[in-house]
Amino acid sequence: MNGTIGPQNLKSGPTSFLNYLLSSLNNAGRERFFPNLRRVELETKQVLYHPDQRISDIFFPEDSVIAMLTVMENGATIESATVGREGASWISASFKSPTMPCQTMVAIPGQAYKVPAEVVEREIRENGAFHNTLSHYSHVLLIQTLRSTACNGLHTLEQRCARWMLLTSDRTGHDRFAITHDFLSQLLGVQRTGVTALVHRLALNGVLEVNRGQIRIADRKKLEELSCECYRIMKAQFSILET
């Protein structure tokens, strides 16, 4: 269960945000947001939304990473989209889409801001610039989702795993993150043994360092060489979003 850091409501508000969407708010928008803004600590595998659950709150990651998982009838899972500091857990809830068919879970623990969906909806109506920013982000998320679908079907496990780790590093701002082989295999939609063998090989080759459930990117250049073009395309989209 997520916990609140500091006071429940940030009436005066932080001076800056790592989250791109929140940082795009103008002064008037921040004043409207602050009374309902809560900073929370997200935990690994914490379920934010179950499939088809009505979404009442939206999470804006700061250094955490949120994954949207498609769950099959037999229990098999695969990541459909991922969200970090560039976006929000389900921004379409603010565009009159109050539910989603995926299970939304925390992939990488860390901090986020939690805002009631109706507050975001109100800001969209009153702040044209914020509406445009969210529309732009929704387009970037769509491109990422389409690219991830192609990547999952056409590229090797090594390429996909390298892409996932690089994007995670970009989103958190760290080269080290905590994730188990079992959870990583769920995100990538493969058997745990395949992920374990791959991570072990990358560690032997000096690309990764693995220690007690923590993975550190030891050689980013080599990891980028192992990744597919999907990483470069997704990174370019996020760069456009931030300009």
Image (spheres, rainbow, N blue to C red):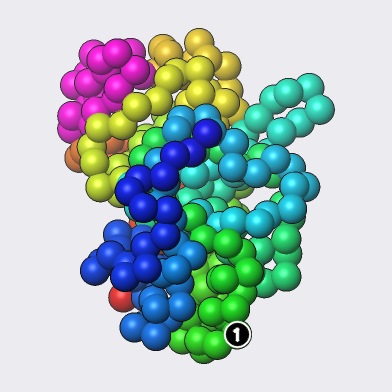
Left or right, residue 157 beside residue 210 = right
> Which quadrant holds residue 23?
bottom left
Q: Quadrant of residue 38?
A: bottom left
Q: Quadrant of residue 48?
A: top right
Q: Percent from the top left, x then y, of residue 178?
A: 34, 27
* Residue picked out by circle 1: 125
In the image, residue 196 sits, relative to residue 71, either above or below, namely above
Q: Is residue 162 left or right of residue 138?
A: left
| 156 vs 59, nearest the viewer | 59
The percent coordinates of residue 71 (x first, y second) are 71, 33
Query: Which SS class for mark 1?
Result: helix
For image coordinates 56% across by 71% down, the residue present is 120
Residue at the spot 31% in from the left edge and 75% down from the top edge: 243
Q: Position of residue 232 (x, y in %)?
A: 36, 54
| Residue at 37% over, 62% down | 10
- On screen, residue 116 versus residue 108, left or right, reads right
Q: Is residue 105 magenta?
A: no
Total number of numbered discs in the rendering: 1
- Crowd tier of the residue under label 1, counting other residues whose Cα lies within 10 Å: few below 14, some 14–19, many 20 or above: few
**Height in image: 168 above or below 19?**
above
First to last magenta residue range: 199-219
Q: Position of residue 184 (x, y in %)?
A: 48, 26
**Does residue 218 appear anywhere in the picture?**
yes
Question: Which is nearer the eye, 102 or 40?
Answer: 40
